[in-house]
Amino acid sequence: MKILTFLHSFEPGGVERVALRLAACWQKQGLDAPVFMGRADGAGRIAEAKRLRLIYPAKPAISPALIETIWMIATLPRAIRREQPDVLFCAGNSYSVVAVAMKLLLGNDCPPIVAKISNDLERRDLPLPARWLYHIWLRIQAMFLDQVVAMEASMKPEIARCMGISDDRTMIIPDPAISQADIHRLARLRKNNVKEVAGRRFVAVGRLTRQKNIAMMLRAFAKGSVSGDTLVIVGDGSLRKSLEAQSRSLGLAECVHFAGHVDDIAPWLAKSDFYLMSSNYEGVPAVIIEALATGLPIITTNCSNAISAMLDGGRLGRIVAAGDEKDMARAIKFSAPDFHLIAGRIDMAGQFTLENSGRLYAGLFAALTDRRRKEQGFLQIRSLKP
C-alpha cells in the first residue's frame, strides 16, 4: 500500500513536522510512504526526513516559495500519475486547496484523500464577512475529501457543524505529536534539570506570526511578571523584529530572550517552569502535548475546541480567553509550581503518541484502499455486462 503525502517545503511548522514523522512511522510499519516536496529548502528538516523517499519537481525559473500553492497544484498531478498511490494524505488545513485541485484536475484518477483537520474551524478571530466566506470554503472542501481526521474527540462536532461532514467520514486519531521515546527523554531531561536562577522561567514556542499573538503575550508578561522572572520565545517569523522592538519598549529587554528557530525544543522545555501560549486559533497544538510530557504547568488561550479536553477542563493548566491580556497577566502573576500534577500531565501526553496514531492511520488507509478496489471491481463488472 502506497501513501503519498504532499508538503510545500521544510520550513518550520507543526503540520510539516508531524507529517514527516508520520511518513517515517508508516514506512517503518512496512508501508510505501513517499513525500512530495514542492522545494528542498527550509530550516525545519528533521532527522526522520533522511529515511524517507522524497520526491521533488523540476526547479522553476523563479523560486517556488513565491508561488508555492500554485506550484504544487501545477506539479503534483504528474507525480500522482507516476507514483499511483493508493491514498493521498493532506497533512493540514493549509493544504486543502491543493487536495481540492487534485480532485478537479484528476477526476476519477485521483486516489482517495484523507485530510487531517489541523486548525480551528470556527475562526472567531476573523471579521464576520471573512468568517462567512471561510465557512463556505469549508463546505466546498467537504465535497472533495473522502475522509477527514479529527485530532481530538471535541473537534468532531465542530467538523460536522462547519463542514457538514457526516460521522462515517470522520475518524478520531489523536495528534501524533510525540513518541514514547520523546516522552521518556523529556522526563529524563526534566529530572536532570538544575535551576540556576531564583525567578520563574517561562517559555513559548511557535512561529512569530499574527496567529500566535505574541504581542499580547509580551504585554501580559510585562504586567504579570515579577522581578527575576524570564521568558524565552523559541521560533522565528516575519514579526520577529517588531516583537523585539515591542519587548524593548515594554522594558523587557533584560528578561525576554528571542531564541529563534531551534531544531530541538526539548532542552528549552526541560529548563523552564511554565509554558505560555497566546494563539488566536489552533487545532491540537503539538507543543502543548510536548509541554504536558515535560510536566510543565501551562497557561494558554482557549484557541481551540481541543484545549479544554487536553488540559482536563483546566485542571492541568490555566485557560484564558483568546486576546484577553488582563486574564493572561493575572495567570502569569499568580502561577506557582504544582508538582502533584506532573504525572497527570505526562499521562495526558501519552494519549498523543506517534506509535498509536500511526497504527490508526494505517488501518484507515487499508479500509479506504479496500473499499476503492471493491468499487472499481464492481464498476468493471458492470461495464462488461451486455
Image: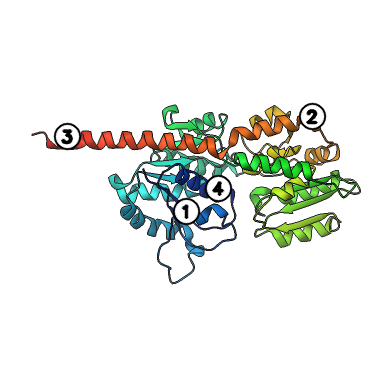
Amino acid bearing label 4: Val
Locate residue 85, reporting x and y percent.
Answer: 35, 47
Locate residue 336, reporting x and y percent.
Answer: 84, 36
On screen, residue 213 versus residue 224, left or right, reads left
Locate residue 31, reporting x and y percent.
Answer: 41, 44
What's the residue at 42%, 38% (across, down)? Answer: 142
Q: Helix, strand, or loop for circle 1?
A: loop
Q: Nearer the viewer, residue 326 or 197?
A: 197
| Crowdedness near tag 1: few (<14), some (14–19) or many (≥20) residues, C-alpha within 10 Å | some
Amino acid bearing label 2: His
- Kindly indicate whether the residue at mark 1 contacts the one at mark 3 (C-beta within 8 angstroms): no
Residue where numbered disc 1 is placed: 52
Mark 4 or mark 3: which comes first in sequence?
A: 4
Of the residues tagged 4 and 2, which is closer to the observer? 2
Q: Helix, strand, or loop for circle 3?
A: helix
Residue where numbered disc 2 is placed: 340
Mark 4 or mark 2: which comes first in sequence?
A: 4
Of the residues tagged 4 and 1, which is closer to the observer? 1
What's the residue at 38%, 50% (across, down)? Answer: 101
